[in-house]
Image (spheres, coloured by chain):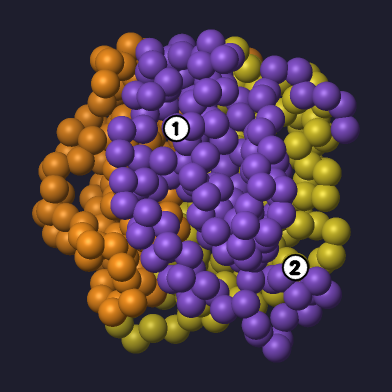
Chain colours: A yellow, B purple, C orange
Amino acid sequence: MLEPATMKALSIATHRRTELLEITDQVQATVRAAGWSDGLLTVYIPHTTAGVTINEHADPDVARDLERRLDELVPWDDPRDRHGEGNTAAHLKTALVGTSATVLLAVDACSWAPGRGVFLCEFDGPRTRQVWVQHAAAG
Amino acid sequence: MLEPATMKALSIATHRRTELLEITDQVQATVRAAGWSDGLLTVYIPHTTAGVTINEHADPDVARDLERRLDELVPWDDPRDRHGEGNTAAHLKTALVGTSATVLLAVDACSWAPGRGVFLCEFDGPRTRQVWVQHAAAG
Amino acid sequence: MLEPATMKALSIATHRRTELLEITDQVQATVRAAGWSDGLLTVYIPHTTAGVTINEHADPDVARDLERRLDELVPWDDPRDRHGEGNTAAHLKTALVGTSATVLLAVDACSWAPGRGVFLCEFDGPRTRQVWVQHAAAG
């Protein structure tokens, strides 16, 4: 893989098999360091057993509830799964939550996020995950 | 929060706890007023208990069926939820449907949407919701 | 509908009612032919009973497992569905998986995809589907 030219990459360590881990501060620091303002900001997870979502961060119980409910909605064990690695459930949760989140940047890197956070959604951890961030200017 | 510079904001009133409310006309009017053409158009919902989806609008029964099936897939009441507001189900439905939808604009604001509509997905209404719209030119 | 100006359109034939069909090669060829590099690449499906996802392509059993699990999560037959065409399940799976996927392009069209593929998610096939691709430059 060639070096990405202008996109930014973060490396994030997760701690459990299923974990919604907030990365808002890291994303906002990246936006500020890059000098990006008005436009579309996409947070992309270059993995297939982890995704990304925007959700409430004021009460950490929201993320905990979502972890438990997602695991109930998509059980880990299913004897009909054929994928040899045994982590089909993680691939499905990733497909449902999505591997990217696009938010809108206004003049300030925080404007898109009052009360909300960006969460890396680990579905087959613990692992070290990459998070890629890119921006396209408004217009 | 600073004023957004170029993105456009809509304010939409919803009517029920779970409601897929079509906002295609408002989004297209916004696109035309802004003069946006070729490129990526992102509709972003700055909330964590409401999302956005692109789906069929020819038959309103599609939206009604989706409301009922989503409520069955993610039941409102779950005694194991810990989130104090009691609306974990709305946060999960938002994570599944997503808080943004990106469509492609061609030379005309309608080209992306024959037979399809943009739906604000209310999961904890009724409320007044914000819908933010932004564009990045093709190239 | 006017002709799209700069976006690219692919036509893809699917083979089963539910099918995750890999279209990575077609998307990458499109990116290369267009000369797009650094920026946001959105793959958009202009239908409401088919979506798109990024997932593992090394083991084809992943896609097969996801097809089966999605059909179990959202059963085709539900006597309470009112939509006359009888394909509400396909509309719901499309809402869950999403009608667009945004990935990040770096200097090379392949950089976003080592080990991962772009899958057209057919939920009411077989049909011939359109796949639209557009790019916004980084900046």
Quadrant position of residue C59: bottom left
Image spot of residue B4 (x, y percent): 77, 24
Check disc 1 and report the residue beneath it.
Answer: B103
Q: Residue at x 51, y 54 (%)?
A: B20
**Chain label for disc 2:** A
Amino acid type indicated by mark 1: Val
Q: CA distance from mark 2 to mark 1?
A: 29 Å
B96 relative to C127 in the view: left or right? right
Viewer-nearest of labels 2 and 1? 1
Q: Which residue is mark 2?
A: A62
**Horizontal and vertical percent position of residue A87:** 45, 71
Local secondary structure at mark 2: helix
Mark number for residue C8?
none
Residue at 76% in and 29% down: A31
Nearer the observer, C119 or C44: C44
Q: Is residue C40 above or below residue B130?
A: above
Looking at the image, which residue is at 43% across and 44% down? B54
Q: Which residue in the rendered view is the most extreme toward the front?
A: B15
* Amino acid carrying mark 2 in the image: Val
Identify the chain of the residue marked 1, using the numbered disc in the image: B
On screen, residue C123 above or below C8: below
Q: Secondary structure at mark 1?
A: strand
Q: Give the residue displayed 76% in from the left and 50% down from the top.
A: A117
